[in-house]
Amino acid sequence: MDIAVWSDTEKMPRHRGELIWPRHRLPCAIGRSGLSADKREGDGATPVGRFPLRRVLYRADRLTLPEIALPVSVIEPSSGWCDDPKDAAYNTQVVLPHKGGHEHLWRLDHLYDVIVVLGHNDAPVRRGLGSAIFLHVAAPDYGATEGCVAVKIDDLVELLVAAKIGDELIVAG
């Protein structure tokens, strides 16, 4: 199953789009800088391309996931993601504390209650070309992301129930 993200900046705000998959057309949030075919670390853009759904991370203290086909791991208080291009662990999950720049995956808000790790800049990792590009839970107002794609949690869980290994997220402008 292909899952598409589409944004038309003439008709919608720069940080908004639609996530489309069989029989579904849902609003989504994208990066504050819109879409980019030339993704760089820290630019706030959602990269354009085809990205495999690698695995799912979730907060077991906040929800129980139904059975899904993708590999699943629990987010712990020590879970992080390295976003420091100078660090050898760049664009990989790390255990906190971590010396290099990183994101905390255990957040007080609910945006990372469910994360789908996308296959962006991971095979191989190229420093500075973007890290921590996820499909995750949207803010209630669908506020801009730092480069991820975000949807309502119920929609994300429904999508994950339907997803299979090998499915891809296609981001296009």
Image (tube, helix red, strand yellow):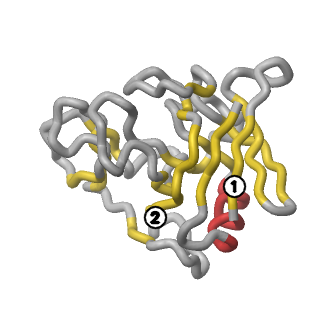
**Residue 116 position within the rendered picture, expressed as x and y whole percent measured from the top left:** 51, 57
Identify the image quadrant of the N terminus: bottom right
**Residue 73 position within the rendered picture, expressed as x and y whole percent measured from the top left:** 39, 69
Q: Identify the residue at horizontal 77%, vertical 41% (top origin).
A: 18
Q: Is residue 114 left or right of residue 34?
A: left
Identify the image quadrant of the C terminus: top right
- Mark before the other along the chain sequence, 1 or 2: 1
Q: Is residue 58 visible?
A: no
Q: Identify the residue at horizontal 31%, vertical 47% (top origin).
A: 124
Q: Is residue 170 above or below residue 9?
A: below
Nearer to me, 94 or 90: 90
Q: Residue under label 2, please give it.
A: 55
Q: Identify the residue at horizontal 30%, vertical 43% (top origin).
A: 125
**Residue 121 position within the rendered picture, expressed as x and y whole percent measured from the top left:** 39, 43
The amino acid type found where label 1 is placed reads Ile
Q: Indicate which disc residue 3 carries.
A: 1
